Amino acid sequence: MIKLDRAEKPTYLTDQKVTELTQEYIKDGKSVWNNNNIKTPLLNSSNNKCAYCECILTKESNYMEVEHFEDKSHNPDKVVLWENLLPSCKKCNGKKGTHDVLNEPIVNPYIENPKDHFVMRLYRMRGKTDRGINSIDVYGLNHSSRLVFSRFEIGEKISELISTSWDRVNTYENNKNTRSKNKLIDIYSSRLSFRNKNISKNMY
């Protein structure tokens, strides 16, 4: 989880529209937030990632759900309040469920910097504060097969690239030949490719 900047409220969500959609939800329970005028700017604000676990929401089996930070069951008047909406994957949204964030506060990445509440140790999130500890449990941020193993794979790949880079640098310093230089270029190109491929899997 990383700090996110909330985009400006969509022009679609005028005061009149918010009132209309809220009343519609209260009346028949319709998912009035499931609209591209709401979903698209949310998705853009998180770089197409889940606001909580950071999985990419536009690839594989992941798809975006509009998450209500103050859950809609207890706060039906906030179902389309822009400041209450976040882009989430189905798993994080389902895990959080109807958690009452007012009675048991958790981290909202649009409001707080997650680094103030979490630290990474051995590829697992550790809470620095009560809010951080609660968030890890509520969002399921240490799910072994889905998140921890992915962090491990990325960490090991980074470690391997660093180790290989140092070996090649030392070889080049000793020999300073074209072949050694080309190997360094290959390592750099590989690192760029790896970064671009895995930029969505931020380890924090």
Image: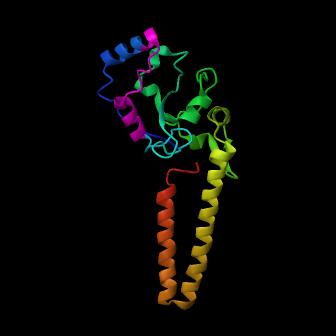
Residue 108, horizontal then vertical, whole percent: 53, 33
Look at 60% across and 21% down and name the residue there.
100
Look at 62% across and 72% down and name the residue there.
163
Magenta includes 27?
yes
Q: Residue furthest front?
A: 61
Report the quarter where the N terminus lies. top right
Residue 164, horizontal then vertical, whole percent: 60, 74
Magenta includes 132?
no
Residue 77, horizontal then vertical, whole percent: 45, 14
Instruction: Note whether residue 58 is visible.
Output: yes
Residue 52, horizontal then vertical, whole percent: 55, 38
Instruction: Note whether residue 9 is visible.
Output: no
Where is residue 42, by image quadrant? top left
Disc tally is 0
In the image, 124: left or right of 40? right
Which residue is nearer to you in this view: 101 or 113?
101
Q: In the rendered view, would you say 93 is above or below 162?
A: above
In the image, 74: left or right of 6? right
Q: In the rendered view, would you say 63 is above or below 33?
A: below
Q: Main secondary structure of the magenta part?
A: helix
In the image, 104: left or right of 78? right
- What segment carries the magenta color? 25-45
